[in-house]
Amino acid sequence: MIDIHPAHHAATTWREFFIHIATIVLGLIIAVGLEQTVEYFHHRHQLAEARRALVVERGANVIYFAAQTAEFHRMAAQLQDDISVLQYLKAHPHAAPETWPAKFNLTTINYAYRNAAWHTADNVLEMMPGPEREADADLYRRLANLQDATRDQRAAMTEIRNCFILYPTLQELSPAQIDHVLDLTAGALAKYGAAASIQRNLNSQYPDFKPSPVLADENKFIHYKGDPEITARGLATLTRVNAEAEAAGADQQ
């Protein structure tokens, strides 16, 4: 801090009065300038630290993304096997496990994406260039959506497992109970398909998040095929809208 001391004697002329005022104003300007300079470099240091933390966090999330893709492939195959077992038991009541077409399994592995560095960076986000800040915000929104989708998967699998609190062993299920478990299993598989779609969209915008599921993976168990012409028109419209939005954002910079 700069101390501003009063004059040793009262001003006796207007000239001395204005010199005293100018000295005080200059001292205040210097003090404020020094304070703002120190604060500026402090914020620049915080921004550099935040960027380093975001890079590390992004690297961890890329690893989780790849692991989730591997888990999608494993669970998509496993849940299809579970469905085939349930359908077999419906056609062959009380069949012994050794005659089943596959092994029934409900074991899952779940991953949680990190966002601590992003939330910690809140106090320096305004110092980031607009495009950088918006890209990071968009990425974390997509990761949050993906995390919500994984929670939906976990809830769906838990609902299937909870059936066996009251139901007997698998080969002793009644036809109605088999239908119930079948519906839940198909619903869980659909949850994995929904998460895979979010992964594909994220990968299309952020290619370092790889590998991601492809549409052909979902088509293996979701047998409905949309109208290709309508899909193509929708993609063309989405591409145009995204381009216009990016152009509008660039004009505002």
Image (cartoon, grey):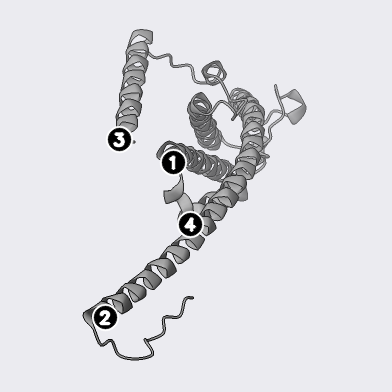
Q: Nearer the viewer, residue 12 or 156?
A: 12
Between the residue at mark 3 and the residue at mark 4, the CA separation in whole angstroms equals 25 Å
Pointer 2: what residue? 17
Position of residue 93 relative to residue 124, above or below, is: above
Pointer 1: what residue? 129
Q: Nearer the viewer, residue 4 or 51?
A: 4
Q: Look at the numbered disc 1 and give the secondary structure of its residue.
A: loop
| Label 4 close to label 2 by CB (< 8 Å) | no
Q: Look at the numbered disc 4 and give the secondary structure of its residue.
A: helix
Q: Nearer the viewer, residue 248 or 164?
A: 248
Q: Which label was assigned to residue 252?
A: 3
Q: Nearer the viewer, mark 3 or mark 4?
A: 4
**Left or right of 204 on screen, residue 79:** right
Query: Type of residue at label 1?
Result: Pro
Q: Position of residue 42 (x, y in %)?
A: 53, 59
Between the residue at mark 4 and the residue at mark 1, the CA separation in whole angstroms equals 15 Å
Q: Position of residue 70 (x, y in %)?
A: 66, 29
**Left or right of 227 on screen, residue 114:** right
